[in-house]
Amino acid sequence: MTLTVLNVAYPLAPVGLNAVGGAEQVLSALDRALVRQGHRSIVVACEGSSTAGILVETPAETGALDETAKSRAQRAHRAAIAAARARWPVDVVHLHGIDFDAYLPDDGPTLVTLHLPLAWYPQEVLRPARDDLWLHAVSDAQQNTAPAGSRLIPPIPNGVDVNALNDPRSRRNFALVLSRICPEKGIHLAIDAAKRAGVPLAIGGQLYPYQTHVQYFADEVEPRLDRRRRFLGPLGFSAKRRLLNSARCLVVPSLAAETSSLVAMEALACGTPVVAFPNGALPNIVEHGKTGFLVNDIDEMAIAIDAAGDLDNETCRAEARDRFSLDRMVSAYMEVYRALAELGASRAASRAAR
């Protein structure tokens, strides 16, 4: 069965191999997999995106990302989705943005991946009335936070390309943070912990022009930077792989309930231990004392950064190979795509026979 799948990105973040966010990375992986398997992949995403399949591009918002910009981007997405569905025989629409309900098609087999904490979504969208609309979480930990009455299919766990990430290098004495720059990611705490540990820290990440994000960077991150704690800005895939393979550890100081933490999986795929607060799904990714350390405060984080160099890199790689396979993730999505496409075809045939 040859599929035509329309993946829809969050309107304000570009997708591609060098995408920063987890949702954008998952979408890009599915786009490449669909093309590789001989299916038609269509992606609605903002300007600056790159895809393996057909890109239906919407204008990029270049100024402040306020409510006006968001509304404008959502309108452009609605128009682009309608145009794509009118032009191609789309079997399944797959939405990835937290604001998916703002441009949700009215009908047709539709899948929504909930990449962010479920509490961040309007609770009514977790109880879809349509019988051709399916929502799912990306981990058991996230699924377990679903409010009563939610209608979610079983989780589809995220995965990473272990083979593409693994690029063994000599380890260097620095810790690494890879993250969006925003308050809930707790980057200032990682800087404080690295200082206490006496270890250099490299910070890679995208600072989007949301007012709260820019203010956080100016107030909490920038004043803490020094010669040994540096902000590198957004990193492409090659730079990210190089740093992950040479760092003594990855630090994940997130204060939010991480739904999956692709970056923690990527670090383990590179043989790099993870030091993290035990929020959300992170306790299911990091095995304390074996592939990293789960810590409760800055003092424990500093001790763990120092101790991470004693953990075995090959153990981390083996854990990633066994548990965080990209192929497994892709196969699960393909099964859902086929099931939804068959459901849509069956209903279309029933309508035609009436």
Image (spheres, helix red, strand yellow):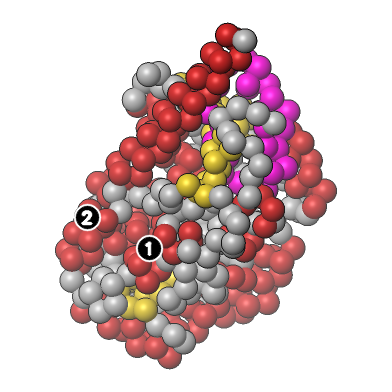
Is residue 157 magenta-colored?
A: no
Q: Is residue 132 above or below residue 319?
A: above
| Element under disc 1 | helix
Question: How far across and down, in percent of the image, does residue 81 sit?
Answer: 66, 28
At label 1, the amino acid type is Ala
Residue 264: image tag: 1
Q: Magenta region: which residues?
A: 78-105
| Element under disc 2 | helix
Name the one closer to the observer, 103 or 15: 103
248 left or right of 280?
A: left
What residue is pinned by disc 2? 322
**From mark 1 to mark 2, how far is it between C-alphas?**
15 Å
Q: Is residue 354 visible?
A: yes
Q: Quadrant of the C terminus?
A: top right
Question: How far across and down, in percent of the image, does residue 246 sit?
Answer: 29, 64
Q: Is residue 166 above or below residue 181?
A: above
Residue drawn at (67%, 37%) of the image: 104
